[in-house]
Image (tube, grey):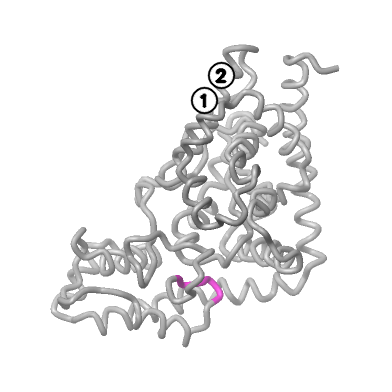
Amino acid sequence: MQKNKKTIFSGIQPSGNLNIGGYIGAIKNWSKFQDEYDCIFSLVDLHTITVRQNPDLLRQRLYDFLALYIACGLDPKKSIIFCQSHVPAHAQLAWILNCFTYIGELGRMTQFKDKSKKHSDNINVGLFSYPILMAADILLYQTNLVPVGVDQKQHIELARNIAIRFNNIYGTVFTIPEPYIDPINKGGKIMSLLEPTKKMSKSDANDNNIINLLDSPDTIVKKMRKAVTDSSSEVRFHESKPGVSNLLCIYSNITNKSIEQLEKQYTNQGYGIFKDDLAQALIEFLQPIQQKYSILRHDETMLNSILQTGAQQAQQLAILTLNKVHEVIGFI
C-alpha cells in the first residue's frame, strides 16, 4: 500500500448469482480504481450468514465469485482480494464498535426493515447488527472512499457517525470514510427485467429478472425478449418508461454508447430489434469474461493461493488499526 494513494474498500456478499447489475454498479468501476487507489476487495462471507446458507453452495459461490472478480478485471497483483472470515480483526473490531452504536441508529436502517419482512422466520441479532460489522470492514483499513449505490449510502453514514463518535472520545483513530458515487451512473441502479421499478438483485427468486454474468447466449436472448417495455414502441429514456430506460442503461454501459446515441440509433426501429440487438451486445460483452472465468474456476489451488495471500496482506493492515483501538480504550 502506498501512503500517497487513497484507500478504497468494497465487498460483495457471496450469495445468489453475480449479474449485469452488480457488474455495472460495482465491479466495472473496481477494475478502474486499481491504478489510482490502494484497493481492498472482500468476499464478505460473515455478512452472508445473517440468512441461512447451504454450506456446500456457499463454499462453491466463494470460489465462483473470486473467479468472476478476476475474469471481470480485478488483478490480485494490484489489489488485495480476500475472504472476510479469514481476517479475524473484522469480527473483533465489530464487537468493540457495537459498544459505540445506539439501538435507535440500527432500528432506522431500511435494509433491516426490508430483510426482516423477507426473512420473517429468521430475524436474528446478526441481521440487526450487521451494519456495525460493515462499519468495521470499512474502518479497519482507514478507508477513504467506499463505492456505493444510493441504496447503500445509509450504511456509510452510520460508519461515519461511529467513527466520529469514537474519535471524539479517543482522538483521531479512524479515517472518516466518504461514499464514492459513480459520476456516470450517479449511484443509479440497474433494475429488474420484469419489474423495472425494483433493483436487479442477485438473490431474486425469479431468474428471468436478471442477466447473470454466466448466462448462456440462448438464455440471454430469451430473457431479453421477455423484458418489460411498455405499450408504445418508442426507444426513449424517460421516467414514464422505466422498462425501456433500464434497458437503455444496460446497453449504454456495456457498449460505452451514450443514451442519446442509442435513442437516435433506434428511432422508428421498435422494441423487437432493440432488444435483439441488446441481447447480442450482452452475449459479445460477456463471452470473454465467461471464457476467462472457466479457466480460473478449474484451478482452485490457484484461487486458494490468492485468498491466502490477500488475507495475509489484509490482516497486516487491519491489525495496525485494531492495536490502536485496543490501546486507546485501555486493553493490555
Q: Quadrant location of residue 304?
A: bottom right
Left or right: 26, with 83 as reference point: left
**Marks 1 and 2: CB-CB under 8 Å?**
yes
Q: Position of residue 265 (x, y in %)?
A: 21, 73
| Quarter that holds the C terminus | top right
Instruction: Kindly identify which numbered label has been placed on residue 12.
Output: none
Q: Quadrant location of residue 208?
A: bottom left
Residue range highlighted in magenta = 210-214
The residue located at (46%, 72%) in the rendering is 211
Frontmost residue, 91 versus 324: 91
The residue located at (68%, 34%) in the rendering is 94
Res. 235 in view: yes
Does the segment drawn in magenta span residue 265?
no
How many numbered marks are there? 2
| Quarter that holds the N terminus | top right
The residue located at (49%, 57%) in the rendering is 28
Residue pointed to by mark 2: 165
Crowding at dot 1, Cα within 10 Å, few <14 / some 14-19 / many 20+, comes out as some
Left or right: 123, with 46 as reference point: left
Crowding at dot 2, Cα within 10 Å, few <14 / some 14-19 / many 20+, comes out as some
Q: Position of residue 324 (x, y in %)?
A: 74, 21
| Residue type at the position of mark 1 | Asn
Residue pointed to by mark 1: 161
Q: Secondary structure at mark 2?
A: helix
Frontmost residue, 223 versus 291: 223
Frontmost residue, 278 versus 34: 278
**How far apart in space, not on screen, are marks 1 and 2 (Cα)?**
6 Å
The residue located at (61%, 16%) in the rendering is 172
